[in-house]
Image (cartoon, rainbow, N blue to C red):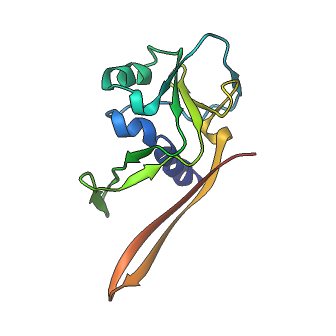
Amino acid sequence: MRSFKIGALSVMLTWAVAAFAGTHTVSIGATSSHIIDRECRIVALEDVKSEMLERFFTGETPNVVLECTEGLSLPFNLRVKGQYLALDYENSTSAITIVKKCFIKCEENEFLFSTDLKSWKPFQEFFTGEIGVSVNVDEGLPTVCLNIEINQRT
């Protein structure tokens, strides 16, 4: 269950990069803090072009930091697939809004997060939260609800 929660949270928190890029794999399991030790170029998420994001994901731009600006809304796609469930919500009009500014960098195939550009932490050390799935009856039909809460770890 813990792996499922961590995986679900990572999906939600990497919404920013997933909204612009294809499929990429990065590590989210490291346990050490990182301190930025080089000159970095901050790029607002809304200004990122596809080619730059691709290079960001492949680790070719370790000096690039994505700024997730408070108030920015991004289109949101949700996919679920497996032996028992399937959902392709790609053509939706849903959006995710960034509530609090943070920064993301990719170093050695690992996403690191920061609020101050000084202290960098991997996903599991930066965020905490909960995920819940329920079935409710809506207008006489069962409705599946996915509830995710994500907060900064203190």
Q: How many marks?
A: 0
Q: Judge whether 134 appears above or below 116 on screen.
A: below
Residue 145, given in percent of the width and then of the height, sits at 43, 70
Q: Residue furthest top?
A: 38
Horizontal relation, residue 95 to residue 119: left or right: left
Residue 126, given in percent of the width and then of the height, sits at 66, 40
**Residue closest to the eye, 126 or 96:** 96
Q: Quadrant of residue 63?
A: top right
Question: Which image quarter holds the N terminus?
Answer: bottom right
Residue 95, given in percent of the width and then of the height, sits at 39, 52
**Residue closest to the eye, 69 or 113:** 69
Residue 142 visible in the snapshot: yes
User: What residue lies at 34% left-to-right and 32% top-to-bottom?
Assistant: 21
Q: Judge whether 77 appears above or below 116 on screen.
A: below
Q: Residue furthest right?
A: 154
Residue 140, given in percent of the width and then of the height, sits at 32, 89
